């Protein structure tokens, strides 16, 4: 049993707020990530989109594809329409031996709307989420049958944000749908990080180590700021720089014999948080937590 440590390039190349990372390149992101010690990177929108091009691009920097975001539209689409929409990504990720696609419903999310408070996110009732989950299970099974697991990413500003949303999604879906467990989004959403991990550990297929600065999150909530405002203000950070106990999370991963990727995803304003320095800090804190938990790291 072992884990691999990867990173999202979002600290260097923010697709939602491209202006703040205009001075950085994707090439720099991969080069520096590999230099720090990361062995995988999630797909960024400024990487090549064709499979052969993406393979060559990643090989150039000796780094693996450890997943990547998939914007879902299943609230509007039929199962067949959604399958058609994600087929290219599923085939590509399977060809590149990615561990999963990181899926989230984006048809009505407010996460990319800088003028919309994150508190005004869309919500569904528990029964509505379970109905959605049953539909999503069909898509997840189709993807799994083609060699590509689907891991759902609960995300601020979306229909699956709070702990209760995660519970309803997992309860309403089959085991074909996995969970991308994201510590930072869960705590920002008011959830109990360890209780949720305990409850759904058997469904966790992918893990995002994301820390938060609670005083900034509190300000965002109390003043009706948007998700993007929260990012710019520094709500998120790397493991060891916020308030989340990643040693406890890592001990739990060891206990459940988790064998997969631990991925740093911590978007910040690089003018306030240098991408290399903070990504290095995150990596070193993960290594420390894994060593303490006797969780082997695969190089």
Image (cartoon, rainbow, N blue to C red):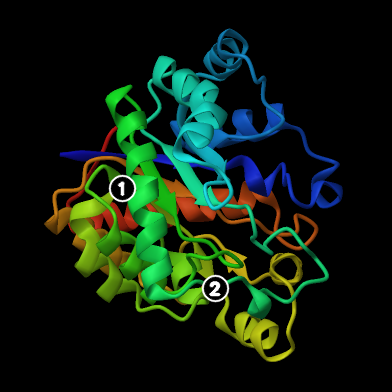
Towards the viewer: 54 or 127:
127
Question: Above or below — where is 196 with respect to 277?
Answer: below
Task: State left or right for residue 119 relative to residue 291.
Answer: right
Q: Residue at x 65, y 46 (%)?
A: 10
Determine whether 210 is above or below 118 in the image. Answer: above
| Residue topped by disc 2 | 123
The answer, for residue 132, to whether it is visible in the render is: yes
Left of 165 or right of it: where is 107?
A: right
In-image side of 27 versus 65 (left or right): right
The residue sitting at 29% across, 70% down in the picture is: 196
Dot 1 corresponds to which residue? 178
Q: Residues within 10 Å of mark 1 (few under 14, many from 20)?
A: many
Q: Secondary structure at mark 2?
A: loop
Quarter of the rendering occupied by the C terminus: top left
> Percent x, y for residue 27?
69, 26
Asked if one can make out residue 241 in the rendered structure from this viewpoint, the answer is: no
**Quadrant showing the N terminus:** top left
Q: Position of residue 199 (x, y in %)?
A: 21, 68
Task: Indicate whether 57 appears above or below 72.
Answer: above
Nearest to N terminus: mark 2 or mark 1: 2
Quarter assignment of residue 166: bottom left
Front one among 127 and 147: 127
Q: Are marks 2 and 1 in contact (CB under 8 Å)?
A: no
User: Separation of disc 2 and disc 1 at Cα?
Assistant: 21 Å
Q: Secondary structure at mark 1?
A: strand
Residue occupying image coordinates x 38% and y 48%: 135
């Amino acid at each position: 049993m072992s884990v691999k440590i990867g990173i999202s390039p979002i600290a260097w190349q923010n697709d939602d707020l491209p202006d703040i990372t205009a001075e950085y390149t994707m090439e720099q992101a991969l080069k520096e990530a590999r230099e720090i010690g990361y062995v995988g990177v999630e797909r960024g929108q400024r990487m090549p989109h064709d499979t052969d091009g993406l393979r060559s691009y990643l090989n150039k920097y000796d780094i693996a594809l450890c997943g990547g975001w998939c914007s879902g539209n299943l609230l509007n689409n039929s199962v067949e329409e959604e399958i058609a929409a994600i087929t290219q990504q599923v085939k590509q990720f399977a060809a590149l031996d990615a561990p999963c696609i990181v899926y989230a419903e984006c048809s009505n999310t407010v996460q990319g709307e800088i003028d919309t408070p994150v508190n005004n996110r869309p919500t569904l009732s528990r029964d509505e989420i379970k109905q959605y989950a049953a539909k999503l299970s069909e898509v997840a099974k189709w993807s799994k049958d083609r060699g590509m697991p689907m891991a759902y990413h609960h995300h601020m500003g979306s229909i699956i944000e709070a702990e209760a949303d995660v519970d309803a999604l997992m309860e309403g879906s089959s085991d074909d749908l996995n969970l991308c467990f994201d510590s930072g989004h869960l705590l920002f959403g008011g959830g109990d990080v360890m209780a949720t991990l305990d409850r759904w550990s058997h469904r966790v297929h992918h893990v995002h180590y994301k820390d938060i600065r609670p005083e900034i999150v509190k300000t965002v909530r109390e003043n009706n700021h948007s998700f993007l405002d929260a990012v710019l203000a520094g709500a998120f950070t790397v493991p060891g720089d916020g308030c989340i106990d990643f040693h406890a999370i890592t001990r739990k991963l060891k206990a459940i014999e988790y064998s997969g990727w631990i991925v740093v995803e911590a978007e910040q304003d690089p003018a306030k948080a240098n991408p290399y320095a903070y990504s290095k800090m995150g990596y070193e804190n993960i290594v420390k937590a894994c060593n303490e938990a006797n969780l082997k790291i695969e190089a």
